[in-house]
Image: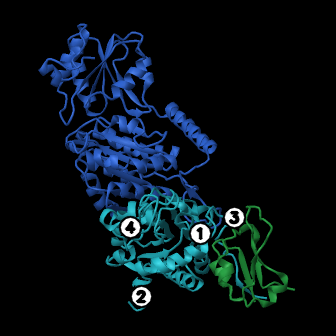
Amino acid sequence: MEKKVIFHEEYCKSCELCVNVCPKKIIRIKDDLNRQGYHPAFVRDEDQELCISCALCARMCPDAVIEVYK
Amino acid sequence: MKPIYQRPKSLKQVVTHYCPGCTHGIAHRLLAEVIDELGIQGKTIGVASVGCSVFAYNYIDVDFQQAAHGRAPAVATGIKRVLPDRIVFTYQGDGDLASIGAAEIVHAAARGENITVIFINNAIYGMTGGQMAPTSLLGQKTTTSPAGRDARAQGYPLRVSELIATIEGARYVARFSLHNPQNIQRAKQGIKKAFSNQIEGKGFSMVELLSTCSTNWGLSPQNALKWLEENMLPVYPLGEFKGKEGE
Amino acid sequence: MSEPVLMKGNEAIAEAAIRAGCRFFFGYPITPQNEIPEYMSKRLPEVGGVFLQAESEVSSINMVYGAAGAGGRVLISSSSPGISLMQEGISYLAGSELPCVIVNMSRGGPGLGGIQPSQADYFQATKGGGHGDYRLIVYGPATIQEACNLMMKAFDVADKYRNPVMVLGDGMIGQMMEPVVFPDTSEVRLPEKPWATTGNEGRKSNLISSIILDPEELDAHNWRLQEKYNRIRENEVMYEVAHGDDSEWFLVAYGTVARICRKVMEQARKNGVKVGLIRPITLWPFPDKAFKDVVHKAKGFLCVEMSTGQMVEDVRLAVNGKAPVYFYGRTGGAVPNPKSVEKRLYEMISGKTPVVSDYWEKRGGGAAE
């Protein structure tokens, strides 16, 4: 399955601004830490099809973590 | 699938030093997007100022000069006068531009210097640790206004865009906010206009971006956006103060 | 070689800069150097250059930073209080290793002081001036012809070492008129500056900066700068020694004071006194060698300045205790007259300590050195 939304976790600082702007509320925070020591944001594979590719998350992200496809 | 949103080419593939949720990151990304869309990466020269964004050159992949505190518009003037066909922008915070660099920004505008100024207003000094800025709000607690900014002792917030818009040499002056995706999109259009003006030789353009400093405001990134919306927007109204379409 | 023309010092210096390929000037009005920006405002547009009067000295030196970083051949001029305002920018230029030429037609201080000639900015010019460990290459011309020659050299030296160069005039140099011959500069070619911020088309991005937060890296940067300054010390020292071979007594002076001292020396030699003159042309790097060459036979050095005693400290360091070093000075625009210098010279020769200032002498007191 091709992903609609891809998180480049290494850039993520866990600010959660993407979580709040997602109209489908499918962005979650991982329990794991990334290399910087943050819990990165992600979308579960099974939630990918719920994504409407609105890219609000990518526009809000201060760290250019997110790529969006349609 | 076709891409809707990708990391701009002009944004280096590195992790920034900014705090989580810091809107500097959004402003950087918008700048990089505009540089990419206008196809000017190879001919753009940035001027980094003193403040958290002093390392902007580590993130935006264009030639850069790092300026002394407040002097970015003077440095940009020097570059532009030597290389009039290049695109020159400054990236300055409110301490840098509205306080120590007040003379430089006013006179760059008065000369109609054909440069683009990105002005980050987060109502506080970030890098030095949360001191009061000329743009701090009345009542705002900072490390140098611990009881809250008091107009009788510390004066009033400076509305820089309104001030610069009164200057004949300024071609485009606008204030946007980075507190939600809709406003971020508008800000991007403003930045693009400010760069397009320079490409077309129209003269001085400044875009003020209302921004957050969650660390020094003592708020979570999300609450900082809310604080901006509720407290800064009434003091710093958004809009194009000069150079609207048709003007 | 062109024909000699009679020119005012400031205008000749400005013309020399243009002939050296300078095409960018930033400045702010201040007496006694206003003829330089005025001349540039007329001449630079004629040669396709840019003249810009800034809103302050603070801005003008930062415009120089931008222009130099963009690869331009840049001149800035001012006088003492204005140069003080530029010190932050000069420190940034030195830290970022940007070439430019700075003219200081210095006047009496401290504070607003006066507008007459002075040499009281020697410390500021040669010891750093702004914050941090850095040096300017500093020329102290004694004639307008020399000022022109040094102006032309200054741009090349600035580019060669990527370092700011100061031409330190003493007000008199700027205001008087003398005949000057401009060397042929039709062959002037500006060096390539691959480090300049001109847009990253086809290469990696360039950066002009002086911020280095890592202590180890900043330490290395400073010692690398010192290596450069040592190269400058080895290669760029300039001075003149008159009658070094047979002299036992030496007058030491730079700039226009050296002209006065030369007259005194010539008169004294007619009277059979074995006196010579040491005239530093580079004030930094200081010509220690000129003193080392004669110190073994020298009975005394009399340093004359339009200050309360600044270069004399470098003379003492160069002489290193091997002979007595005396000082005589006037300040605030008062120029030492030959009679007074002669008097101090004979005081020294007769075994007395020369009185340091006419002011103290009149009052019968003051700290004799």
Amino acid marked by disc 4: Ile
Q: Residue B22 carries which label?
A: 1
Task: Judge left or right: residue B194 versus residue C263.
Answer: right
Chain to which the residue tagged by mark 1 belongs: B
Chain to which the residue tagged by mark 3 belongs: B
Q: Earlier in the sequence, mark 2 or mark 1?
A: 1
Q: Which of marks 2 and 1 is in front?
A: 1
Task: Judge left or right: residue C282 versus residue C276.
Answer: right
Q: Earlier in the sequence, mark 1 or mark 3?
A: 3
Q: Residue B244 carries which label?
A: 2
Q: Which of C75 and B186 is in front in this view?
A: B186
**Helix, strand or loop under label 1:** loop
How far apart, in angstroms, are the residues tagged by discs 1 and 3? 16 Å
Q: Can residue C184 be seen in this view?
A: no
| Residue found at x 54% / y 54% | C209
Q: Which mark is residue B14?
A: 3
Q: Residue furthest top?
A: C351
Neighbours of disc 2 within 10 Å: few (<14), some (14-19), many (20+): few
**Helix, strand or loop under label 4:** helix
Supply the letter of whichever chain is cyan: B
How far apart, in angstroms, are the residues tagged by discs 2 and 1? 29 Å
Amino acid marked by disc 2: Lys
Q: Can residue C100 be seen in this view?
A: yes
Q: Which of marks 4 and 1 is in front?
A: 1
Q: Position of residue C248 (x, y in %)?
A: 33, 11
How far apart, in angstroms, are the residues tagged by discs 2 and 4? 21 Å
Q: Earlier in the sequence, mark 3 or mark 2?
A: 3
What colour has chain A? green
Q: Which mark is residue B105?
A: 4
What colour has chain C? blue
> Are the residues flagged by discs 1 and 3 from a single subunit?
yes
